[in-house]
Structures are given as C-alpha cells and as structure tokens.
C-alpha cells in the first residue's frame, strides 16, 4: 500500500505496454485453468481449439467464445447445483454465494476457495484505498449479510486495511443510524437507494446527518451510484463525499472503482480483469466514447474461471488520461449506465430507468418513486412515474407538471405521467432497488408482464 493514494502502486501506474504484457500472461493462465475444467467453459475452449500458447496478443481474446448467463443457468439445471463450472472439487470450497435474484429465472450459485477469498478482498482494497479510506477509519457496512455476495468482500477488505469494521446486518434502519452515530463511523458502505433511505429515516428522527461523523459514503450495487443527481443528493443529505464502485457475484468482487479525484467514472482494475466493450447486437468491439456491452475476463478467481462473460451492463470506455490521479487504467465514463435488458419499449420509444432516475433525483423533495407501465382501454401503453413527497416538502404546487415535462424530454418526447401517492406507500429497498412495475397487457392474451426493474 502507498499513503499517496495507491493500494498497489506498481500495478496501478504500470505503463500501458507493460500492463498489456501482464494481462496477456494472466489471460493465458486463465485459459489453461478453464480449458482443464470439465464444465461448459472448458468445452467451449476445446471445441474452439483455443490453447494458451496460441494467444500471442491481447486481441486474440476474441478467439474465445462468449459465455452468457443463460449458458450458466442451463449448466446449473443440467448438472445441479453448480453446473460443473468449478476448476476445483466443490468440497474444497470455503464459501458459497448467490446472485441477488433481481434478474434471471433463478439465482446463480458460486463457490470460492480460501485463495479466491483473499483475492476478492484485495480487489475491494483497491477501491477503499483509492477513495481515501485509511486504517484510522471506522467503516459501517449497511448490508444484510445474507447469501448475496454484496459487501462481504468489502467487510474483509476493511479488516485487511486495518479499519474498525462495523457490520450492519440484522438491524432496522433506525438501529443502523443509531450505531453509525454511536460508533462515530467515518465511512458508510451501502447501495445508493439505501443511503437515501437512511437519510429519510434520519430526517424523521430529527437527526442531522450532515453534522455527523461520516465523511465518505462508498456506493455499490446499482447504476444509480454514477448518476450525478443521485450522488449530489446523497452528498447533500450526508454532508459527505461519495464514490461509486461496481461488482458482480459472477466475479465475486468489484472490477471498477472511483478514486478520490472522482473523474465522473470508475477505474477498471485492469491488472486483474480484461474488459471489452462490444455492440450488444453484433458482438463486435466498439471504440472509446461509444456505449456498448461489457464483456469481462477474470484473472483472479481460480475456483471459478470466467472468460469473455457477457454481463449485459452498458458502459462507455474512456482512456486513463481522463483522470489526473496518475493511474494508467482506463475508466468507464459515467460508471455502469444501465443494462441491455433494462430498456423499456413504450409506444415504440426506448425508455431507460436510469434516465428517469437522473431527472427525479434533481428534486430532493421526492423521497421515493416508482415507474408504472400499464395498458389503457386494452390498447394504449402508458407510463407513469409515481412519487412520494412527504408534507409536500419544498414544493410550489407545480412539481408534477414540471417533472412530467422534464421526463418527457428525457424520454424522447414520450408523454410520461406523474402522480403523487401517499407517503410510505411505495416499496423501500436495502439492496438493489426494483422500481419498475410493468402491468401491461400482452395484446391477444390475458396475462400481464412480469416486473423487470
């Protein structure tokens, strides 16, 4: 570690040619592990004739077939419970985790060995140290500590750094707030949604969070962590600096973090991940500055190799020089911008929940919101945004009209209705928020569509 801001100063500042040499060496090792495994990824490599020694430059990664969530779930169903994906016997594992269940028909099950878990926490150390967290800090993790991998790695990273680590599992929101204040936590880790939920509860209890001890809020778990309006609102409520991170259960840890310079995007942890951005339809690579789908190859998780995994995350890659921190790792401008399958098609217009949240969060008087899709008169698709404004806090009576106008502009001119609902009537979330309620009728059938958000 380095007190000047780098957890791994050598790797975080490697000249680009040396970084690419390191990535190529680690890519070959990952292919060797996966090829030797009996599961679907090993079969894909063997059928495609991909051998480690054939990879002579990074562009050769494109010889490796894509791997998808559907293929992973199919493997689990064909050979339960783990689909034969592990590169070591399941009996050698020390941890089992599941995806959160916010997408897909079933959760993905993952296993890790002791060396994997050391690596998982190491990746989180990059993020904490890069955001300025030091051994003197007291870190509260507002997290349920269940089977979802969430902030488990963050917990162990804080211990590894030397922080006083405060687990916030099995507590009410009020109890968590009391512990944050009683233990004088200086850092809070949560999803963006729950950071705002904590702030709402603090207002109800008459607690001035901005006057409290918390100086940093580390966000993860939702694309909202990179929405400027959401971050500004969290910073205003907490009187603290925020930074975004992003991870996946499939990887076991974070692959991106925002440093103290906060360049409007997250550094890709490129010494441990090889990231590509491709066209979601064609699978062909897209250049810097163009939005595409993340495809990730992981180097560090030996128990569960993952090569060219299509994440469905939407990102825009930017060169390292965009940030002045000195890291040579590229960034994702704006973090995770959403998911390929999050897009809502309403009367022929593409609508993204992230764009709606970016508009809603410009109005701090709104405590919670929900996107409601339905069919009027059995024919016409409609989209409304339901909002809670407790006590009409700070409104001038025209909030709904102004918000509808802004939402329409963000949705390409589509009419978006805005309806105020009773305070406390909309769902609250501790982990990933699900704010889309899709009740549209499928024409020619009587069923409604399953909620997607």
Image (cartoon, rainbow, N blue to C red):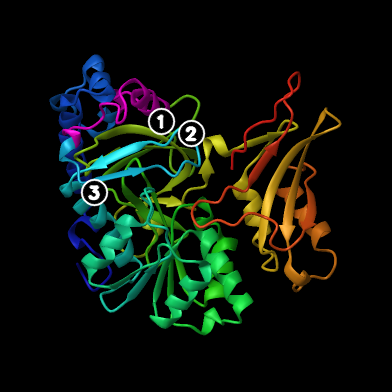
Bounds of the magenta segment? 62-90
Q: Earlier in the sequence, mark 2 or mark 1?
A: 1
Percent across and percent down for residue 260 are: 38, 68
What residue is disc 2 on? 104
* Magenta span includes 68: yes
Q: Give me the C-alpha separation between circle 1 and circle 3.
A: 24 Å
Along the viewing direction, whichever of 187 and 323 lies nearer the viewer: 187
Circle nearer the viewer, 1 or 3: 1
Q: Is residue 395 above or below residue 96?
A: below
Q: Is residue 25 visible?
A: no
Q: Which circle's residue, 1 or 3, is located before the other in the chain?
A: 1
Q: Residue furthest bottom?
A: 211
Q: Given this view, does label 2 or label 3 mark the residue nearer the observer? A: 2
Residue 340: say if magenta. Answer: no
> What SS does tag 1 mark?
helix
Q: Which residue is mark 3?
A: 271
Q: Which mark is residue 69?
A: 1
- SS at circle 3: loop
Q: Position of residue 401 (x, y in %)?
A: 83, 57
Q: Nearer the viewer, residue 234 or 274?
A: 234
């Amino acid at each position: 570690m380095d007190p000047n801001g780098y957890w791994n100063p050598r790797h975080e500042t490697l000249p680009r040619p040396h970084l690419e040499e390191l990535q190529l060496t680690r890519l070959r090792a990952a292919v060797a592990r996966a090829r030797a495994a009996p599961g679907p990824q090993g079969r894909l490599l063997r059928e495609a004739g991909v051998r480690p020694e054939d990879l002579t430059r990074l562009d050769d990664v494109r010889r490796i077939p894509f791997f998808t969530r559907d293929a992973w779930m199919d493997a689990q169903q064909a050979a339960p419970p783990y689909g034969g994906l592990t590169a070591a016997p399941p009996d050698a594992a020390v941890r089992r985790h599941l995806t959160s269940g916010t997408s897909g028909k079933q959760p993905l099950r993952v296993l890790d060995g002791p060396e994997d878990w050391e690596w998982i926490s190491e990746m989180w150390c990059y993020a904490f140290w890069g955001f300025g967290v030091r051994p003197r800090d007291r870190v509260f993790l507002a997290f349920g500590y269940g089977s979802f991998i969430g902030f488990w790695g963050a917990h162990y990273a804080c211990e590894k750094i030397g922080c006083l680590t405060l687990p916030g599992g099995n507590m009410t929101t009020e109890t968590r707030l009391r512990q944050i204040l009683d233990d004088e936590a200086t850092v809070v880790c949560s999803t963006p949604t729950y950071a705002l939920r904590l702030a709402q509860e603090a207002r109800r209890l008459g607690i001035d969070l901005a006057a409290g001890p918390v100086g940093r809020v580390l966000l993860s778990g939702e694309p909202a962590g990179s929405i400027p309006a959401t971050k500004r609102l969290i910073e205003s409520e907490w009187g603290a600096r925020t930074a975004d991170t992003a991870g996946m259960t499939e990887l076991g840890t974070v692959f991106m973090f925002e440093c103290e310079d906060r360049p409007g995007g997250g550094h890709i942890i490129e010494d441990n991940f090889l990231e590509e951005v491709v066209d979601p339809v064609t699978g062909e690579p897209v250049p810097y500055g163009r939005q595409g789908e993340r495809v990730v190859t992981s180097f560090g998780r030996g128990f569960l190799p993952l090569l060219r995994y299509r994440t469905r995350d939407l990102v825009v890659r930017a060169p390292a020089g965009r940030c002045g921190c000195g890291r040579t790792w590229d960034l994702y401008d704006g973090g995770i911008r959403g998911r390929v399958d999050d897009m809502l098609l309403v009367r022929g217009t593409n609508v993204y929940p992230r764009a709606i949240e970016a508009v809603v969060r410009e109005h701090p008087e709104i405590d919670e919101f929900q996107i409601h899709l339905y069919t009027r008169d059995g024919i016409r698709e409609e989209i409304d945004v339901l909002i809670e404004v407790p006590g009409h806090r700070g409104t001038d009576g025209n909030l709904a009209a102004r918000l509808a106008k802004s939402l329409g502009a963000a949705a390409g001119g589509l009419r978006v209705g805005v309806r105020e609902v009773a305070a406390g009537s909309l769902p609250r979330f501790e982990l990933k928020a699900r704010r889309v309620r899709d009740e549209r009728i499928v024409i020619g059938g009587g069923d409604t569509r399953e909620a997607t958000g």
